[in-house]
């Protein structure tokens, strides 16, 4: 991980901001050492000299004072006041926020009511009242502005602390016997610093403006000293005759504020914890993608553009949901789903390497070559589907969604690596497909890619067609709309879908009512059972729960007051109840009034599922959606998902690591390993005749009820990271080889193709279980192979040659070695 | 009869719905029973499974048992003494000897600290006030020892939590719980967030630790197959109370309550 400084240096926004800021800040800081005239020296004889006069490069003002000197010194005081005010506000505000947030209850109630009272005053009025009480003067103006901003910081920090307080690591610290104040300092503070820094940079510009405003009104800097605002104020009298005197300080203020805001935005991008390190767990990444939507609507940077007072917009947000939270997430994932343009080594490597790759792996034999050979495979598959062998009942109907050669490239130390690699997937309407694999195998990335989301800093390759339209080429707006209406996503971590500061009822209401004008327009989409018809779909930020992003900001922007008085309230309430009923939460007393932290793990996941169902989507992508649920609820949710897909031709992509669960629900199962599909089989085949050693190993380590003594042979080692899979030792061959009990030397020489073993059953292995190759030399023998001493014995060698000949249709061992050698070299040269 | 390690006597938990100033008002709070008065005895060396649906009170009960939340009623005894009445020394011992492993391991690790620091901080707390308090070398040694016990490599100690896989994070969490040489581990769904292979690793590890260190477990799970494997006694919770308890084999093969039967029927089978 690079240091913040290094990353700032590479951020164009930060650099431009710094450059702009430097124009003002550098001279202001250097003022005492610059050969400037005395800014307070009046020389009536020289009043209103034009720019370029000797000794006065920018001329003089009405009292004959040197304008340049006054500008620079004025900027110096404006900046000082702004910075000090921001620091003071941050300090006091954070203190209040921490006390209120961490100690909760009465402390919280009292402090926050006080803050509310302050916030009830219009902002500038409050500052004015404070200066009026303290008397005019720059120091008092600073204090006034700082105090007026305290509530803003207090609310934001409190929001952040509330979130942190409910984290398990706080409890863990208590378990270690630490005292509360110690916990605040060691566990809470480090997590707050970025939030506070972000808040400061976003408010600094505003504080500079406010100081200028107070001085402009004559309440700030007193003559003969002047800050930029005071200069503007006095210059105003001569606006028509000598515009220069007023325009120049105005310009400097503009430059200063623009610079600060540009830099602040950049800093926020970089400091945001969710973007800080690229290897984050996907739960968080999904959160980012949701936030990407929010980014468009609720980003403070956009507030400015809307002509909104940033602090006020911030206040409203804070009033509703706590700026800390939102501030943290809002800018996250700005690049979710946005293609990254630069081509990287892997790209070329893939282009150059793949032909050989395919040669080795047997082109035209049912692998997933993206080009011509594909047609052959497709035709075969279509024929198969028509004959309805293990395929979905929909016959040859075009698929609802089809991914072809879909790769998800993620950033790694060595450049972009394919975390999902050339994946093909077809889902018929009404079909239920399961996707299993270890953690990190690329399941979540695939699921998100089907929604058109690339991970931050990464990008997608290949195609994802939704009824023939390639999602990856769509316009962001159209895509967002599709995500809302057609595809919904239930996340792995329920907390990603839920706003910690919104009650469950409001959470759902929000998901339903946002963009409700479009519900009627799209009424035909919602042909529901039960009253679900009314749920219809809403135009969306980004699928299912992702909806919350823009929706939330929309509500937030509308201000707290509008929340309750929304739309036909009764109807919405009914829908909320229907949704709760659907996920089996209707019986929980007071559920609608609860906050997410008052829910059990299973309950919050059910709320998340309810939010996804609110849109009545054609395709529901559930990513570990039942993992947090207990078995009985899980069974109910499975039944619900099944009913939803059966009755309405709705497809389901069910992602899970639980093989037993997947086979219970799905018609077909894809097994992923290190970003590659290694087995694709109808449910029965997978259970009765699993072919890939990886699938077999997964089945072996599932605990089974009634067999407590069954050994659970965990698969030794770890799956490769995307970088290891792309460049590591096993990159040229079968990716599972380092962990495979059946691996042979030949396995490392080229990646096996995804070959058809039986109708509808494809496997990527040279020695699949149950095949001739493994039957002849397997059994007791296989343990010898695990040892993989040196070279296979003769019999094995023969098998290998057979098998490879079967694939390549040419040569044998030597030939394939030559190929893979070449392939290897090319890969190597990418390093 | 030997004294149980931990005993919950009639503990109950009410959650209040009202918040803020309203809660100070008489009648401003709506109370809700999350846990009905419950008894639970955890003998030394036992492995007790707690199963039940979400919201049935498993976590509430386990947090009370761990001293993470106060019961609204009833009492928790640590080796025969109510925990409020423990003298400072016994109290410190209680803190060391009873540890908790959280469901979501990653969330239980402070994202801003490296693994090594997390472990150091924990030991600093556990050894506070003892003669070992300032013993830096001793701390290092203990951390390395425990890391080896749970199979955490050195490289991993220098990582931040988000750089760990779920299984690794759970190992760190278990390591943290083991630092104070606990007698009782309360594990709240420690494997439900893990994939099959990692789950197998952690389950095998837990079996091993129990065998080698003679640990006592209170193991919360909704996965009956996992409980069956690890626990010799099982308690079934429903609606805030324990409705059935007994030897694991007995309860699973011969469930008496209809809820237990439903639970068994819901287990996905191949
Ligand atoms: N933004 C990113 N930057 C770098 N690497 C990433 C990024 N997102 C994902 N990865 C990596 O891509 C791989 C696949 O991740 P993914 O989250 O899809 O796995 P998964 O199968 O869903 O795992 P789990 O079962 O834990 O949810 C992992 O190795 C992960 O570390
Ligand atoms: S047998 Fe060979 S090809 Fe098949 S999974 Fe094992 S290493 Fe890969
Ligand atoms: Mg995942």
Image (cartoon, grey):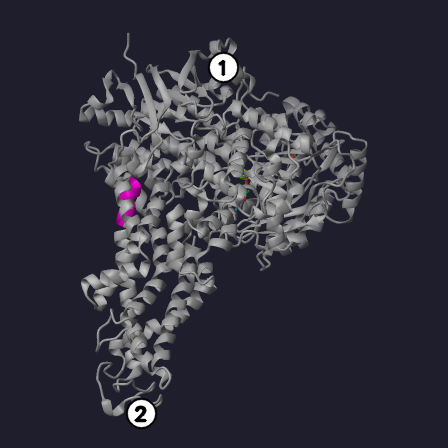
Q: Tell me which chain the residue with mark 2 is part of.
A: A
Please say whether residue A713 is visible from this viewpoint: yes
* Same chain check for tags 1 and 2: no
Give the image quarter of residue A634: top right
**Chain where mark 1 sits:** B
Q: Is residue B169 left or right of residue A783?
A: left
**Residue under circle 2?**
A54
Estimate the spatial distance between the alpha carbons at disc 1 and disc 2, rounded to whole Å: 96 Å
Classify the position of the C terminus of chain A by image quarter. bottom right
In the rendered image, residue A788, in percent from the top left (x then y), is placed at 60, 33
Q: Ligand 2 is found in which quarter of the picture?
A: top right
Position above or below: A260 against A828 = below
- How many residues crowd around disc 1 within 10 Å: few (fewer than 14), some, or many (20 or more)? many
Residue at 49%, 15% in the rendered image: B259
Give, as a single range, the part of the protein colored magenta.
Answer: A95-102
Q: Is residue A285 left or right of residue A735?
A: left
User: Is residue A183 depicted above or below A90 in this figure?
Assistant: above
Examine the structure image and report whether residue A338 is included in the region drawn in magenta: no
> Which mark identifies residue B260?
1
Q: Tell me which residue sits at (29%, 84%) in the image.
A: A61
Main SS of residues in magenta: helix
Q: Can you give x and y, in whole percent of width and height, for residue A712 in the image?
A: 52, 23
**Helix, strand or loop at mark 1:** helix
Question: Residue placed farthest to the top in the image?
Answer: B1
Residue B38 appears left or right of A513: left
Task: Point out residue B67 in the picture as x, y percentages from the top left corner.
Answer: 29, 26
The front one of A404 and A575 is A575
Mark 2 is surrounded, within 10 Å at the Cα level, by few (under 14), some (14 to 19) or many (20 or more) other residues, namely few
- A395, A699: nearer the viewer: A395
Residue A501 position within the rendered picture, expressed as x and y whole percent measured from the top left: 40, 41
Instruction: Tell me the tag on residue A134.
Output: none
């Amino acid at each position: 991980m690079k240091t913040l400084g290094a990353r700032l240096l590479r951020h164009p926004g930060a650099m431009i901001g710094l450059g702009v800021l430097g124009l003002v800040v550098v001279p202001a800081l250097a003022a005492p050492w610059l050969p400037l005239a005395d800014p307070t020296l009046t020389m009536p004889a020289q009043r209103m000299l034009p720019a370029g006069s000797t000794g006065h490069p920018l001329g003089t003002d009405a009292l004959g004072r040197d304008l340049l000197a006054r500008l620079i010194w004025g900027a110096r005081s404006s900046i000082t006041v702004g910075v000090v005010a921001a620091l003071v506000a941050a300090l006091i505000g954070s203190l209040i926020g921490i006390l209120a947030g961490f100690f909760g209850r009465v402390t919280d109630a009292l402090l926050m009511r006080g803050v509310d009272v302050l916030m009830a005053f219009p902002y500038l009025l409050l500052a004015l009242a404070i200066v009026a009480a303290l008397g005019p003067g720059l120091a008092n103006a600073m204090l006034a502005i700082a105090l007026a901003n305290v509530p803003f910081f207090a609310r934001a920090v409190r929001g952040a602390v509330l979130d942190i307080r409910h984290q398990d690591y706080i409890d863990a610290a208590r378990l270690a016997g630490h005292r509360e104040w110690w916990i605040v300092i060691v566990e809470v503070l480090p997590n707050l610093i970025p939030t506070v820094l972000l808040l400061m940079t976003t408010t600094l510009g505003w504080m500079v403006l406010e100081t200028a405003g107070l001085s402009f009104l004559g309440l700030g800097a007193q003559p003969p000293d002047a800050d930029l605002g005071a200069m503007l104020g006095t210059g105003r009298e001569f606006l028509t005759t000598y515009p220069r005197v007023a325009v120049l300080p105005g310009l400097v203020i503009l430059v200063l504020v623009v610079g600060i805001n540009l830099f602040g935005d950049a800093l926020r991008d970089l400091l945001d914890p969710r973007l800080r390190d690229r290897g984050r767990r996907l739960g968080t990444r999904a959160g980012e993608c949701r936030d990407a939507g929010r980014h468009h609507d609720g980003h403070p940077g956009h507030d400015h553009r809307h002509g909104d007072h940033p602090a006020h917009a911030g206040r409203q947000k804070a009033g509703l949901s706590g700026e800390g939270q939102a501030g943290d997430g809002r800018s996250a994932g700005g690049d979710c789903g946005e293609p990254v343009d630069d081509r990287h080594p892997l790209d070329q490597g893939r282009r150059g390497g793949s032909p050989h790759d395919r040669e080795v792996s047997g082109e035209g034999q049912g692998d997933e070559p993206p080009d011509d050979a594909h047609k052959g495979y497709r035709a075969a598959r279509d024929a198969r589907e028509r004959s309805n062998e293990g395929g979905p009942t929909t016959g040859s109907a075009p698929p609802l969604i089809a991914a072809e050669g879909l790769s998800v490239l993620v950033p790694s130390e060595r450049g972009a690596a394919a975390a999902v690699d050339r994946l093909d997937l077809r889902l018929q309407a009404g079909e239920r497909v399961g996707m299993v694999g270890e953690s990190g195998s690329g399941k979540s990335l695939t699921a998100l890619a089907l929604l058109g989301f690339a991970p931050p800093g990464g990008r997608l390759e290949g195609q994802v067609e939704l009824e023939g339209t390639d999602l990856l080429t769509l316009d962001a707006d159209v895509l967002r709309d599709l995500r809302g209406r057609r595809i919904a996503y239930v996340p792995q971590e329920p907390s990603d879908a839920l706003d910690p500061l919104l009650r469950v009822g409001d959470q759902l209401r929000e998901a339903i009512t946002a963009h409700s004008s479009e519900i009627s327009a799209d009424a035909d989409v919602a042909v529901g059972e039960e009253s679900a018809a009314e749920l219809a779909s809403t135009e969306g930020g980004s699928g299912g729960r992702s909806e919350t992003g823009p929706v939330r900001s929309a509500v937030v922007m509308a201000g707290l007051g509008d929340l309750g008085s929304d739309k036909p309230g009764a109807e919405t309430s009914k829908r909320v109840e229907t949704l709760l009923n659907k996920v089996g939460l209707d019986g929980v007393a007071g559920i609608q009034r609860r906050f997410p932290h008052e829910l059990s793990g299973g309950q919050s996941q059910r709320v998340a599922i309810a939010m996804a169902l609110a849109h009545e989507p054609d395709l529901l992508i559930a990513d570990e959606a039942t993992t947090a649920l207990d078995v009985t609820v899980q069974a109910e949710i499975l039944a619900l998902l099944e009913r939803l897909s059966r009755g309405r031709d709705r497809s389901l992509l069910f992602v899970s690591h639980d093989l037993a669960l997947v086979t219970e629900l799905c018609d077909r199962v894809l097994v992923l390993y290190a970003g590659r599909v290694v087995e694709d089989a109808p449910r029965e085949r997978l259970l009765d005749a699993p072919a890939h050693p990886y699938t077999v190993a997964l089945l072996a380590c599932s605990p089974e009820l009634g067999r407590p003594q069954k050994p659970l042979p965990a698969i030794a080692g770890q799956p490769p990271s995307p970088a290891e899979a792309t460049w590591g030792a096993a990159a040229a061959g079968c990716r599972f080889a380092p962990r495979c009990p059946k691996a042979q030397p030949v396995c490392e020489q080229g990646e096996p193709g995804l070959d058809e073993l039986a109708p509808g059953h494809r496997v990527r292995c040279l020695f699949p279980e149950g095949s001739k190759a493994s039957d002849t030399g397997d059994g007791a023998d296989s343990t010898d192979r695990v040892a993989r001493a040196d070279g296979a014995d003769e019999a094995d060698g023969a098998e290998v040659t057979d098998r490879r000949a079967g694939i390549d249709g040419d040569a044998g061992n030597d030939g394939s070695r030559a190929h893979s050698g070449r392939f290897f070299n090319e890969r190597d040269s990418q390093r | 009869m030997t004294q149980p390690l931990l005993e919950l006597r009639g503990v109950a938990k009410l959650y209040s719905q009202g918040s803020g100033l309203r809660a100070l008002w008489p009648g401003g709070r709506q109370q809700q029973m999350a846990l009905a008065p419950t008894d639970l005895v955890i003998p030394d060396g036992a492995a007790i499974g707690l199963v039940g649906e979400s919201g049935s009170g498993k976590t509430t009960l386990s947090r009370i048992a761990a001293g993470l939340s106060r019961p609204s009623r009833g009492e928790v005894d640590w080796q025969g003494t109510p925990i409020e009445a423990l003298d400072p020394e016994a109290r410190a011992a209680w803190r060391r000897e009873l540890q908790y492993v959280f469901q979501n391991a990653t969330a239980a690790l402070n994202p801003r600290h490296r693994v090594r620091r997390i472990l150091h901080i924990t030991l600093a707390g556990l050894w506070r006030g003892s003669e070992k308090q300032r013993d830096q070398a001793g701390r290092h040694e203990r951390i390395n020892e425990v890391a080896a016990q749970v199979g955490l490599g050195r490289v991993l100690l220098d990582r931040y939590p988000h750089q760990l896989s779920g299984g690794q994070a759970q190992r760190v969490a278990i390591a943290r719980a083991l630092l104070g040489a606990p007698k009782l581990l309360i594990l709240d769904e420690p494997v439900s967030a893990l994939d099959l292979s990692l789950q197998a690793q952690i389950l095998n590890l837990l079996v091993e630790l129990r065998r080698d260190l003679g640990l006592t477990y209170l193991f919360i799970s909704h996965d009956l197959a996992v409980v069956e494997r690890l626990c010799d006694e099982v308690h079934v919770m429903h609606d805030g109370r324990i409705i059935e308890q007994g030897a694991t084999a007995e309860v699973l093969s011969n469930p008496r309550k209809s809820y237990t039967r439903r639970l068994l029927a819901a287990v996905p089978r191949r």
